[in-house]
Image (cartoon, grey):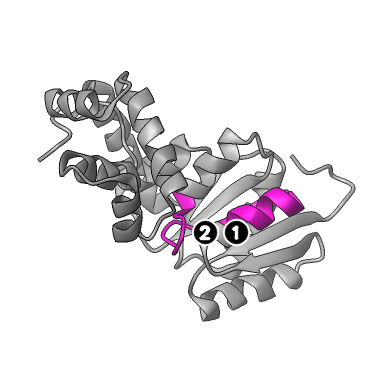
């Protein structure tokens, strides 16, 4: 949480340059906010957020390299204290749920006014949680659905890795098909092992079939 006696340091990541520049310009116009960096992809954003440790990061949910949710998961894993505002054109309840579960402090639509976005940044820096009115109903329904379902909740990327594992793909092959490094693929595989309580690929596929996680 940002101390009250200094400007809130903000980082913005979005692969749409015109939209990103508009948000950055609005941040620069607010005296209590300070823009400390921008990125057009998730991988660069993660590296620079860890390096610069802004008070708040504004992330698009779908970016090249790493998605906003994957950046959130990495920040949580590495205990980075930066709080995150997600800005997204996607309002699917599963995406909202996964972002909040991964640690997002706010989820706003890209239709939000620039002033509303800046207000949310300031609120999140004070420790508040902000959700766009459009996502409330869907998020509540998603929580109820997942409460009634004992299947492990997988991220979209984990679902892709699981499907390729079932096809018998190696980590390098998965990396080529998903444009990820083999190390990143292995990290996702480890997360899948942890979520399904297994230690190898054969057991992973068997457990996924029991939980009906594979089509």
| 161 or 73: nearer the viewer | 161
Q: Can residue 175 be seen in this view?
A: yes
Q: Residue at x 32, y 41 (%)?
A: 158
* Coordinates of residue 68 in the picture (x, y in percent): 48, 53
- From the image, tell me which residue sits under label 1: 45
Q: Residue furthest right?
A: 5
Question: Quarter of the image containing the C terminus?
Answer: top left
| 64 or 17: nearer the viewer | 64
Q: Residue furthest left?
A: 215
Question: Quarter of the image containing the N terminus?
Answer: top right
Left of 57 or right of it: where is 186?
A: left
Q: How crowded is mark 2: few (under 14 residues within 10 Å), some or many (20 or more)?
A: many
- From the image, tell me which residue sits under label 2: 42
- Residue 76 picture quarter: top right
Q: Can residue 104 be seen in this view?
A: no
Say if 155 sits above or below 87 in the image: above
Contact check, label 2 and label 1, Cβ < 8 Å = yes
| 162 or 19: nearer the viewer | 162
Magenta stretch bounds: 46-69
Say if 51 sits above or below 137 in the image: below
Find out whether residue 12 is within the magenta segment. no
| 208 or 109: nearer the viewer | 208
Q: Residue at x 54, y 42 (%)?
A: 74
Q: Which residue is drawn at 31% across and 36% down?
A: 154
* Coordinates of residue 58 in the picture (x, y in percent): 59, 57
Q: Is mark 1 on a helix, strand or loop?
A: helix
């Amino acid at each position: 949480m940002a101390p009250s006696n200094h400007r809130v340091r903000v980082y913005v990541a979005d692969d749409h340059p015109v939209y990103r520049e508009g948000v950055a310009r609005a941040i620069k116009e607010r005296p209590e906010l300070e823009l400390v960096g921008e990125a057009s992809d998730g991988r660069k954003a993660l590296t620079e957020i860890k390096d610069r440790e802004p008070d708040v990061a504004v992330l698009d949910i779908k970016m090249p390299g790493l998605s906003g949710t994957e950046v959130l998961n990495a920040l949580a894993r590495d205990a980075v204290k930066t709080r995150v505002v997600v800005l997204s054109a996607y309002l699917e309840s599963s995406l909202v749920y996964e972002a909040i579960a991964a640690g997002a402090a706010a989820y706003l639509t890209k239709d939000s006014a620039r002033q509303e976005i800046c207000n949310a940044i300031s609120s999140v820096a004070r420790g508040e949680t902000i959700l766009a009115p459009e996502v409330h109903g869907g998020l509540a329904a998603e929580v109820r659905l997942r409460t009634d379902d004992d299947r492990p909740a997988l991220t979209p990327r984990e679902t892709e890795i699981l499907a390729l594992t079932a096809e018998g793909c190696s980590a390098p092959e998965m990396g080529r098909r998903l444009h990820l490094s083999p190390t990143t693929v292995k990290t996702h595989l480890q997360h899948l092992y942890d979520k399904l309580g297994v230690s190898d690929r054969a057991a992973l596929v068997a457990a996924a079939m029991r939980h009906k996680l594979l089509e």
